[in-house]
Image (tube, grey):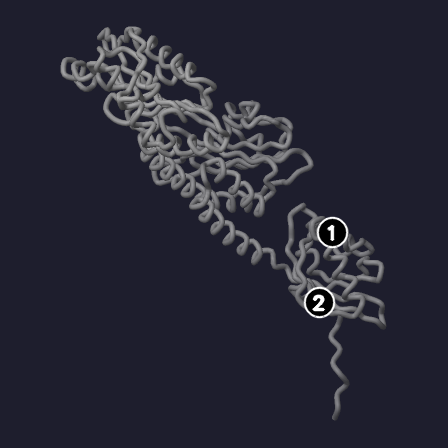
Amino acid sequence: MDRPPYSPPSAFIDLLLDAVCVVDAEGRFVFVSAACERIFGYSPQEMIGRPMIEMVAPEDRARTLQAADEIMAGQAKPHFENRYLRKDGKIAHIMWSARWSEADQLRIAVARDITERKQAESLHAALYAISEAAHTAEDLLALFRQIHQIIGALLPAQNFSVALYDASHDRLSFPYHVDEREQASTPRCSAADALCAEVIHSERALLLTPETQHELAGQLQPAVDPDALCWLGVPLNSPDGAIGALALKSYRGGALYSDQDKELLQFVSNQVAAAIERNQLHARLRHMAQYDQLTQLPNRGLLHDRLRTALARARRETGRMALLYLDLDNFKQINDSLGHAAGDLLLQEVASRLKLCVRDADTVARIGGDEFVVLLESIQVPAHAAALAEKIRELLNQPMDLAGHALCILPSIGIALYPEHGDTMEQLLKHADDAMYGAKSRGGNRIQLRIRTGPDGDDFEASAPA
């Protein structure tokens, strides 16, 4: 006996995990299954008659309307993805299988919630991007900018801060701070300081919402920004403790962060902490390779790099520059009589005084022992180099009180000019070095300027006696 075709009751549709939606030619919902409430947060009654496009994330509306036109033209869309705004304000990632019914003049679609899959993919991409940023970022500021962009792809991050904690000095700083209502690069109030400090010292994430702010300890209550809707901070944990914190803030009308967002940001922050420590280590290694560890002045290698760059610029712009080669008279006697500790203090004081004499564009380098070189870029006339050398000589002649010892150190200074005394780094350094030894052979505490070569091959030099 033949049975009639089985026709399932419409209630079966409500048992599906995926949502069934029917939209008319004007783009309004005319039927939705029960699963829509789980996926979108709205009841079927709230969705019926509502324009579909109103629920689509603004960034996806244009291409969603284009896809709708193509479906109504007869092109089926089995794997179209876009984002919807749920009733609670969260984003839902949807994969649609849709086609047009010409007879009914309706668009029939099945919606599958792929939010968890998309979040997992985004998280995996974010962790990879953070790892890449740790290797490619030129410095910490560049790293923080990239991290801000990466986190912004996971969570609303219009207002984002990175706080770093210096345990040796018990000091909190904000090397990166972006706030839609602030122009400054550091927080304008103490709220960020107090809340980030709490996150760092407790080494626990802190989520403040309108419902949870009353749970704050008394000392933190005044730190809450009255204009903020939500504040989310997570520690940057390392094996030796928290090295800082990441903080997100939203204002009224903005995003409402959740416990899930807190867990996500904390997971990402572990990778960020490793990236920051890696960048800091590389920065320390670069500094050690380029700077003298005693005086923190550029070393010989960095001086050579800057001198090459300055020479290239001077040639290109037909400019002038000068080198001052400086040696401390009788420095060995101070080391022998007072010890190397006093000698080190003396070198540090000399470095400090030299930096007081020059412009920001100039370079003061320690190239070994008690020898220093000053690179003067873009001087107008040779007299400017001689005037600076005299300023240095007079400042170093002033007594120094180091570890209870009153010391008076006297310099011998040689000057080389570009282009008069050479066109290469080697020529200029040799001229300045020879001039310095000429000053020292004449009793020291003087300036020697190499000006020309006589017809018999001997060098004529001008000296500025003490």
Residue 178: name its quadrant. top right
| SS class, disc 2 | strand
Q: Residues within 10 Å of mark 1 (few under 14, many from 20)?
A: some
Does 121 appear above or below 109?
above
Does 423 appear above or below 77?
above
Identity, as a three-letter code, of the amino acid under mark 1: Met
Q: Which residue is mark 2?
A: 77
The front one of 393 and 424 is 424
Identity, as a three-letter code, of the amino acid under mark 2: Lys
Q: Does 90 sit left or right of 447 as displayed?
A: right
Q: Which residue is mark 1?
A: 55
Q: Position of residue 56 (x, y in %)?
A: 72, 52
The front one of 278 and 106 is 278
Q: Position of residue 443 (x, y in %)?
A: 22, 10
| SS class, disc 1 | helix
Q: What residue is drawn where x is 26% and y is 22%?
A: 456
Q: Residues within 10 Å of mark 2 (few under 14, many from 20)?
A: some
Does 169 appear above or below 202?
above
Specify the label residue 448 is tagged with.
none
Q: Does 346 sit left or right of 354 as displayed?
A: left
Q: Nearer the viewer, mark 2 or mark 1?
A: 2
Q: Position of residue 67 (x, y in %)?
A: 74, 61
Q: Does 420 sit left or right of 158 as displayed?
A: left
Position of the C terminus by quadrant: top left
Q: Is residue 345 visible?
A: no
